[in-house]
Image: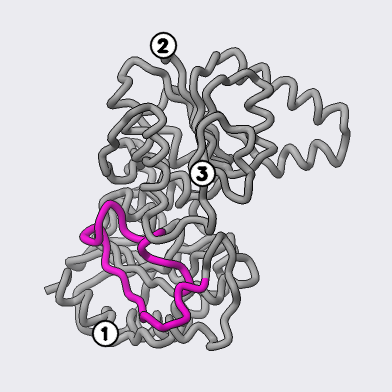
């Protein structure tokens, strides 16, 4: 079979998109002349647009489509027709559908893509031509390795490449100028980025994914008092309450950039940091993709599935192996009767001690 164009479709968030980058790199290495297209949502576009292994990135924003449908069914079907034509013109030979959504599978089947590869979770892969059954969601191995397993349908033995996130000199210059704007000067031996939020996609249950604010305050105080460090707080607009509480209660002055950066600016400034301390989530995945030394807190989510990749040396995980964790399984959080004891049991002193020994000595 002659292969000229390959499509990878991933409509999910930051972590899931980065987990797909080893798949993309393996494809490009195996088929160097093939054009690889990637479809993602608008929010994650900044972390894919400079991927040198991709020929083109196409934005598909589900919420925008829903908005059009609410206003006019006619305009909605026009939009579908236009988008479908754009895909058909690319004449894809193969697609990797990482959505686990039968509606997308049916759509791409109707567009005439002959070889459609993906996951079959709860029979949602019924329109795929080649699929791997996933009974209980991702478990026991990293999501990136699930993606790589799909390459068996192309008779490939994949390599465990790291996540890819590319920045250019312009991105870095913008980030440096932002720090100048806030009158930041790196006058100490290390720049520490702290992400006390994460878990926006969990919405009302994000609390259960976050190490306690008080623990972050205590850790920042110890870092400020005992080490020569500059500290920056990162977070989305939805995490301002968390960051402002920490900022207002730490003893030493730190820089709070929560809600003040877009995703590109965040990536650029993270690339300038020496270490990143974060809850499990997009910020952690970005930091490891940029090759930063990371320290990350895992509570309800299994670190073997969503943690450091390709091995534990990429980041340091803080966790407590209670009998009830992980309680996030089959893409669902079961709830917690112990007020996130798994995270509350990780004290600031042990975190500080490990960071100091591993990095700041």
Give residue 268's position: percent from left, percent from top.
36, 48
Give residue 128's position: percent from left, percent from top.
58, 32
Considering only vertical position in the picture, is 9 above or below 93? below
Residue 90 appears in which quarter of the rendering? top right
First-in-chain label (1 vs 3): 3
Q: Which residues are magenta?
A: 300-327
Q: Foreground mark, 3 or 2?
A: 2
Q: Residues within 10 Å of mark 2 (few under 14, many from 20)?
A: few
Q: Which mark is residue 2?
A: 2
Distance of mark 3 from mark 2, alpha carbons?
A: 31 Å
Q: Give 226 or 74, whichever is nearer the viewer.
A: 74
Residue 324 located within the stretch drawn in magenta: yes
Q: Quadrant of the N terminus?
A: top left
- Report the residue at 58% width, 44% height from top: 100
* Residue assigned mark 1: 350
Secondary structure beneath label 3? loop
Q: Residues within 10 Å of mark 3 (few under 14, many from 20)?
A: many
* Residue assigned mark 3: 44
- Report the residue at 49% width, 65% height from top: 198
First-in-chain label (3 vs 2): 2
Asked if residue 180 can be seen in this view, the reply is no
Considering only vertical position in the picture, is 134 above or below 114? below
Q: Which mark is residue 99?
A: none
Considering only vertical position in the picture, is 106 above or below 232? above
Q: Give 89 or 329, whichever is nearer the viewer.
A: 329
Residue 129 located within the stretch drawn in magenta: no
Distance of mark 1 from mark 3, alpha carbons?
A: 34 Å
Q: Give 137 or 84, whichever is nearer the viewer.
A: 137
Considering only vertical position in the picture, is 96 above or below 63? above
Q: How many marks?
A: 3
Residue 232 appears in which quarter of the rendering? bottom left
**Is 257 displayed left or right of 352 in the figure?**
right
């Amino acid at each position: 079979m002659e292969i000229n164009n390959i499509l990878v479709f991933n409509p999910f968030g930051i972590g899931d998109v980065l987990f797909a980058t080893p798949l993309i790199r393996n494809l490009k290495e195996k088929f160097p002349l093939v054009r690889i297209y990637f479809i993602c949502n608008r929010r994650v576009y900044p972390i894919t647009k400079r991927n040198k292994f991709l020929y083109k990135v196409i934005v598909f924003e589900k919420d925008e489509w829903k908005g059009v449908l609410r206003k006019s069914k006619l305009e909605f079907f026009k939009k579908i027709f236009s988008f479908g034509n754009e895909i058909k013109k690319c004449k894809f030979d193969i697609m990797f559908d990482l959505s686990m959504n039968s509606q997308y599978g049916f759509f791409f089947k109707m567009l005439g893509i002959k070889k459609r590869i993906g996951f079959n979770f709860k029979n949602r892969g019924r329109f795929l031509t080649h699929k791997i059954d996933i009974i209980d969601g991702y478990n026991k191995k990293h999501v990136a390795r699930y993606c790589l397993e799909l390459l068996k349908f192309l008779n490939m033995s994949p390599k465990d490449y790291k996540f890819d996130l590319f920045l250019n000199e312009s991105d870095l210059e913008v980030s440096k100028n932002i720090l100048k704007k806030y009158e930041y000067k790196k006058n100490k031996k290390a720049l520490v980025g702290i992400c006390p939020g994460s878990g926006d996609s969990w919405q009302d249950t994000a609390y259960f994914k976050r190490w306690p604010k008080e623990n972050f305050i205590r850790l920042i105080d110890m870092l400020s008092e005992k080490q020569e460090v500059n500290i920056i707080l990162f977070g989305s607009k939805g995490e301002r309450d968390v960051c402002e509480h920490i900022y207002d209660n730490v003893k030493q002055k730190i820089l709070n950039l929560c809600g003040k950066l877009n995703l590109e600016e965040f990536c650029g400034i993270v690339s300038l940091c020496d270490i990143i301390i974060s809850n499990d989530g997009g910020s952690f995945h970005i930091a490891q993709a940029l090759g930063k030394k990371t320290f990350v807190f895992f509570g309800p989510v299994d670190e073997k599935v969503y943690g450091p990749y390709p091995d534990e040396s990429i980041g340091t995980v803080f966790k407590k192996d209670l009998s009830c964790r992980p309680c996030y399984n089959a893409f669902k959080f079961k709830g917690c009767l112990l007020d996130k004891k798994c995270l509350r049991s990780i004290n600031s002193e042990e975190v500080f001690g490990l960071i100091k020994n591993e990095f700041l000595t």
